[in-house]
Amino acid sequence: MVAKIDDVARHAGVAPSTVSYVLSGKRSISERTRQRVLRSVEALGYQPHAGARSLASNRSNVVALVVPLRAGIHVPVIMQFATSVVTAARGHDHDVLLLTQDEGVKGLRRVAGTALVDAIIVMDVELHDPRIPVLRKLQRPAVLIGFPADTEGLTCIDLDFAAAGAACVDHLAALGHRRVALVGSPPEVYERKTGFARRTLAGFTRAASAHGIATSVHPCEDTPDAATRVATELLRDHPDVTGVVVHNEPVAAPLLGAFREAGRVVPDDLSVVAICPDEVAERTSPELTSVAIPADEIGRQAVDLVMAKLNGEQVPNATLLRPRLVQRRSSGAPGRSNRRPV
Amino acid sequence: MVAKIDDVARHAGVAPSTVSYVLSGKRSISERTRQRVLRSVEALGYQPHAGARSLASNRSNVVALVVPLRAGIHVPVIMQFATSVVTAARGHDHDVLLLTQDEGVKGLRRVAGTALVDAIIVMDVELHDPRIPVLRKLQRPAVLIGFPADTEGLTCIDLDFAAAGAACVDHLAALGHRRVALVGSPPEVYERKTGFARRTLAGFTRAASAHGIATSVHPCEDTPDAATRVATELLRDHPDVTGVVVHNEPVAAPLLGAFREAGRVVPDDLSVVAICPDEVAERTSPELTSVAIPADEIGRQAVDLVMAKLNGEQVPNATLLRPRLVQRRSSGAPGRSNRRPV
DNA sequence: ATGAAAGCGCTAACAG
DNA sequence: CTGTTAGCGCTTTCAT
């Protein structure tokens, strides 16, 4: 038979409530009884029943994490978010319930309504996400990773993509580039999705105009063939481009390959800067100068925010993480061209 | 205030237990009262409290899923497993609690001991996994994805990697190839890991010897550079190789690139067959003939198995999924060589 | 600083 | 086929 709180109380010669308080730390206990109780807990291998605890305290110590499934999102980054959320949640003595996006609004209502979870973290929020109104009136704290059109009454966190786009241009401008191109996400991402594509574009454009740099923008499907096509068009239509910003992880490597096949040496003929996870940047040849999506950091902070809300603290409704550009081998001054024949 | 079961009972003019039984279907109810209760549930927006339910019934309706984190595992496949497990679990009215491998044995003990979960699914089991003994004596059903050295008292499921390795060789043999190479996982995977690498190798070797085909084996780190290195060595040391089996997703594409750069046309000079997810096989150029890892199917069946165990049914302790080879563009008869100069 | 006792909301005997 | 009732194991007032 498994030990109950009463067994521990009896074993330690105290009241059940004392055991509870020792474990929760919700009131001061003399060091002596504390030790006695802890020893009994240890001796009996006591583990409190999660359901009983949840029923009595109205806290399940579980947070829901809603992960996206759809294409156009780089899967390893999702995993990275997820693991960082799990790790951070454990640090707050919480577990993580995994929901998929296709459970949609119903899933949110269910886990919140049944008190299965105390709070909700939603990844990959779209500009006009149908879940937003539901989250607004749900009686549970929520944190969104990504920004919807209106953040009123919500708590949102993400990389500052506008600043990231700008940082890439700033970097290229400082190196002396005068015309840069942005290879971005597929068209549908700009049209209805999370807004991060638009924000990157905005930062890119703003910084370029501040530096007096010419630009072009090239949406790109996330397939190798599309990358080749875009690279060809880009070099043909804008032969004076010396700097390229890539915001589309899956095509980063194929794009480098396409430039190489086109006879352009990176970084001698062409500098390439990407917004992508470090793992992607470090696995290309040459390694990519990049602004990373700090999935770990975002996941951790999302959990911190949601825990703060659970504790009744006030939190900002928008948190933008400052981008950090890491220089690697794919960028340098323009005009060092040493082009080999095609 | 949120509706309780008593509210529903009062509203419907029945006893609370009747409401419970209507919802659980655990005893027969006249269609008339059933409808009345359901209408009341609807009207009041009743949602049973998960904690209360778990306390009273000793069932949380949650299963734990332990996902791996370490390198050498292709992340998208993990995600695919995870989503298929979540979807399948929902089909059985269960939710999924996400655990990371680094919580290790403690995490298993915790979620099982606190009755947070009813059952456990563990991915990426190693040959001598420290969690095995714990799972054996835990008072909860468990299903392992992957095979440890000894499956006694366990329930394991995985792709039949031996059959998969053999299927690749069979395919190449049928096409007329006489010497084939296996490009496999990094050495450490063979040494201490899940056994699937070994099983693939065993099937590969067995089938080759059955067909009287010469073989060589080439462990390969999962980086593009390693792929290039291995390709070079392979072609240098075994110039008569016409068929290559790749069991290492991350290097499949780079390997094709390396063969191309070495002047070998696939499939004219060299046939390549991979064991990898369809998404990987379909995104290379040329598209890879492959045996897929049926993540969806494995996830679904893992859930079915664990649910069967929860229902007290007997289940086999080893389930091997038959491989399915899909022919694409990367394999053909040997000797059609049309090699262009390097 | 500690105890006693009243629930938390539901399920599952038991009773009819 | 349905109602009555006794817990499930814990937390948290209230009391001292």
Image: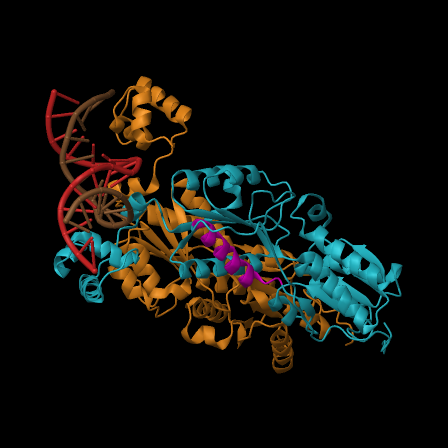
Chain colours: A cyan, B orange, C red, D brown
Residue B229, above or below A218: below
State the image quarter where residue A184 is shown: bottom right
Which residue is at a point 56% across and 61% down the rendered structure image? A295
Which residue is at a point 52% across and 59% down the rendered structure image? A301
- Looking at the picture, tell me which residue is in the foreground, A76 or B228: A76
Q: Number of numbered discs present?
A: 0
- Looking at the picture, tell me which residue is in the foreground, B235 or B257: B257
- Quick check: is A303 in the magenta stretch? yes
State the image quarter where residue A86 is shown: bottom left
Residue B228, above or below A166: below
- x, y percent for residue A243: 80, 67
- x, y percent for residue A19: 21, 56
| The C terminus of chain A - image quarter | bottom right
Q: Is residue A139 left or right of residue B227?
A: left
Q: Is residue B16 left or right of residue A173?
A: left
- x, y percent for residue C16: 12, 20
- x, y percent for residue B131: 33, 65
Q: Is residue B294 in view from this perspective?
A: no
Farthest-out residue, top: B32
- Looking at the picture, tell me which residue is in the foreground, B177 or B4: B4
**Magenta stretch, overall SS:** helix
